[in-house]
Image (cartoon, rainbow, N blue to C red):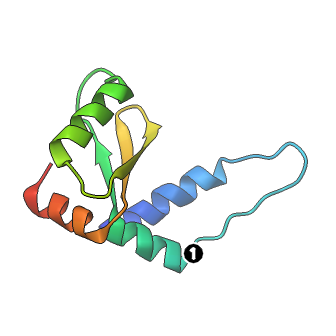
Amino acid sequence: MSQQDDLVEALSAKTNKLKCSRKSVKLKDSERAVEELYSTGLLGKLWVDRTINKNVVKAIILKAWRTSKGVQIVDLKDNMYLFKFASEGDHKRTMELGP
């Protein structure tokens, strides 16, 4: 399975858990949204035995990557984050230079 397939599967699993108290809501995978996320997003997991404060993680990542147009950091669950880059260039540079 590719990284894109894993990401789609993880996002689909999260949407399946969503509930609305009044009306049923169904979310459909958007191929365009998946392509955009794949070209400008990263999924990151910290492999540690304890939960790290998300503000600390965000501060370190922002300082280390020094993106030209910024990066949005979404806390998915304990020590797992979604990084959405504002530009494909920042995404590509981060991928090439490593974490």
Q: Is residue 24 left or right of residue 91?
A: right
Where residue 20 appears, as percent x and y from the top left, is: 81, 46
Task: State whether residue 81 is above or below residue 48.
Answer: below
Residue occupying the far front of the picture: 68
Displayed quadrant of residue 75:
top left
**Relative to residue 91, is residue 44 depicted above or below?**
above
User: Quadrant where the N terminus lies?
Assistant: bottom left
Q: Residue type at mark 1? A: Ser
Return the residue found at the far right.
22
Question: What residue do we see at 55% from left, 54% from top?
Answer: 13
Hey, which residue is sitting farthest left in the picture? 97
Res 52 → quadrant = top left
Q: Residue at x 90, y 47 (%)?
A: 22
How crowded is the residue under tag 1: few (<14 C-alpha within 10 Å), some, or many (20+)? few
Question: Residue at the spot x=28%, y=32% of the render?
Answer: 59
**Can residue 4 be seen by looking at this rendering?**
no
Q: Choose between 33 and 9: the one closer to the eye.
A: 33
Look at 57% across and 50% down and name the residue there.
14
The part of the image, by quadrant, that contains residue 88 is bottom left
Q: Secondary structure at mark 1?
A: loop
Q: Total marks drawn?
A: 1
Q: Which residue is mark 1?
A: 30
Q: Position of residue 10 (x, y in %)?
A: 47, 56
Q: Seen in the image, is 48 located left or right of residue 15?
A: left
| Residue 25 against residue 82 in the figure, above or below | below
- Residue 2 is situated, as x and y percent measured from the top left of the image, at 31, 70
- Can residue 52 be seen? yes
